[in-house]
Amino acid sequence: MSWLREHRVALAGLTLFTLLAGDAWRYSLSWYGWGALTAVLGIAWVLVAVQERVDMRRVPVALGAIAAYLTLSIAWSAYPGASAIGVAVTLITGAVAVVITQVLSLGEVVRALSAAVRWILGLSLLFELAVATLVRQPLLPFWTSYEEPYPAAFTWSRNLLFEGGRIQGIVGNANLLAFVALLAVIVVSVQWRLRSTDPGHEASLPRVTAIGWVAIAVGVLALTRSSTVLVASLGVALALAVLLLARRLSGRARAALYGGAVAAAAGLTTAAIALRQPLLDLLGRSDDLTGRLDIWSAVIDLAQERPWFGWGWVSYWAPWVEPFDDLVVIRGVTYLQAHNAWLDVWLQLGILGLILMGVFVLTTTVRTIGWAVDAPRGDIADPAALRLAPALILAMLLVHSLAESRLLIEAGLLLLVWIAVASRRHELRWHRAGATA
């Protein structure tokens, strides 16, 4: 029934596209159109789960603990209505990731993600070209009416393609478009390498196609000039080097490598903080990290009022409730995230939630590294190149989480849960294969 699996790959691709480029739908079809589309996607995944009899309980213990705790936070939330909505959206997103993990292989997920990011990049360049040649002025989202002067952040496209400015693409945000571009570099490069090592694999891409899309993705990275994604790119490069070297080592040598990598990452972080001013000058960024210092200060002050259990889970900040309605307003723009996933977890779930999240991420990281490094056995033999994809995506998500909160919402959350559950399934099957070898 290959046709059925192909339809599920297409459904996964559309789902990832929608989560990565949600504003493209909201700006073009309105919030109601976006809501209808997400409802249809949700129903489709429910039907898949029922058809395949997916067991939603087969998740890592740490993930289950996080899900239970954030649901329980509704009881003490300062905004229970908004918390209920946030919890529901978070659980639905995580549930879709669990279903994807159980009905699609690693190669099929990589294919779906690759298709989604390539469509976003291609449409974004066409969109910016149309705005620059036909509209010839900044373009606002459809279904909106802002009184001038309105903040530049409200525009869908700032019409900067021919002016050397940062393009925003169909996602309406330069940093998010850069995030998609880096994802494309990772998955398409994996598919390119897969073509060389296992040319008959379903997830591989022809050499010319792969080179072309990597070039496009790198070009988009240059056009967006996102400092946060540049740092995430360095993190991915470091992770790749460590993983490839770890495959050649074993025992104490491998443990020493991991310890050295952690020490190097800590050292680089310390050096970046100490030398932040010259680095910011080099990157052309303001000394307040584009307003992030003010945002972090406001979040820390608020989190300290409820340090242990937090204010209640809400995911993306709800702009219609206190304290988020005016917590951070910079140049007329109300910010709806802490721009640091860990500060957001502390704010919403407190220190206990931060500990649970840390355990969840740490255990997921350990399993994912093992998945990428250890040679497969028996019927779990994914090609070596393909097994790098989850680890590199996780490295990108974790580095990116230091300056953005997208790890906790939409595509970031789905990818994190997918990696957590998929790595656990791999680990269990690995142990079974080892026991019968």
Image (tube, rainbow, N blue to C red):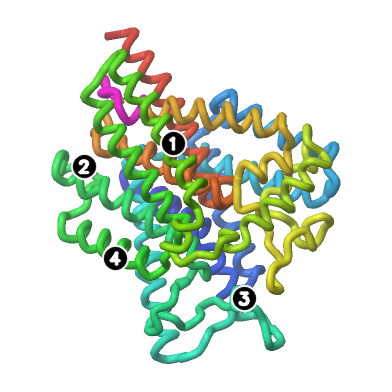
Magenta region, residue range: 370-379
Mark positioned earlier in the residue sequence (1 or 3)? 3
Q: Which mark is residue 201?
A: 2
Viewport quadrant of the C terminus: top left
Q: Amino acid at mark 4?
A: Ile
Mark positioned earlier in the residue sequence (1 or 4)? 4
Viewport quadrant of the N terminus: top left
| 217, above or below 268, in the image | below
Is 429 placed left or right of 302 in the picture?
Answer: left
Whether residue 376 is in magenta: the answer is yes
Residue 170 in the image, given as x and y percentages of width and height: 47, 71
| Foreground disc of the pair 2, 1 | 1
How far apart are labels 2 and 1 at the CA level?
A: 40 Å
Q: Dot 2 surroundings within 10 Å: few (below 14), some, or many (20 or more)? A: some
Depth check, front residue: 427 or 98: 427
Q: Secondary structure at mark 1?
A: helix
Mark positioned earlier in the residue sequence (2 or 3)? 3
Residue marked by disc 4: 216
